[in-house]
Image: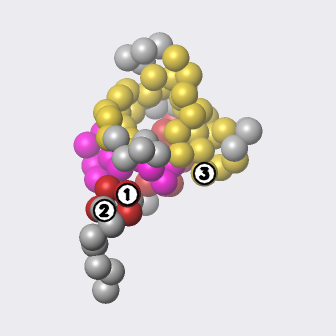
Amino acid sequence: MAIEEVIDRAVMLQQTIIIEYCTRSGKVFVCEITDIEYSRYYGGGYILARRTDIDEDRTFKVSKILKVNGHSFTRIFWKQIGDNFNRI
């Protein structure tokens, strides 16, 4: 199952989920989110959700979500790998 399908399900069923997320700067953090919906402003590649740990609404780019409830969705971020990585 792809990350997009998992997010679709969470939106439809109004589930609270725990995500591992990679920021633009390459920092990774874990948080619980609830009240998930697709962003009307940014489009379907983004979700708007409430972070329960800080009690604030945040926008998340779906492609930067690495895990949902502990299940991995591997994505490569070139900033994390570094400049010395030789592509095949």
SS assignment at label 2: loop
In the rendered image, which residue does mark 1 sit on? 79
Q: Name the residue under label 3.
A: 45
Q: Nearer the viewer, mark 2 or mark 3?
A: 2
Between 57 and 71, which is closer to the camera in this rendering? 57
- Please say whether residue 64 is one of the residues in the magenta stretch: yes
Residue 36 in view in this figure: yes
Q: Which amino acid, by three-letter code, is at mark 3?
A: Gly
Q: Which residue is drawn at 38% across and 17% down?
A: 53
For badge 2, the amino acid type reads Gly
User: Residue 80, percent across and down?
Assistant: 32, 56
Q: Describe residue 88's horizontal placement relative to residue 50 as left or right.
A: left
Q: Distance between the residues labelled 1 and 2?
A: 5 Å
The residue carrying pointer 3 sits among few (fewer than 14), some (14 to 19) or many (20 or more) residues within 10 Å by Cα, namely few
Give percent across and percent down for residue 11.
Answer: 55, 38
Residue 55: where, in percent of width, then height?
Answer: 47, 13
Query: Can residue 11 be seen at all in this image of the molecule?
Result: no
Labels 2 and 3: the sequence-earlier one: 3
Residue segment shown in magenta? 62-73
Mark 1–mark 2 contact, CB under 8 Å?
A: yes
Residue occupying the far bottom of the picture: 88
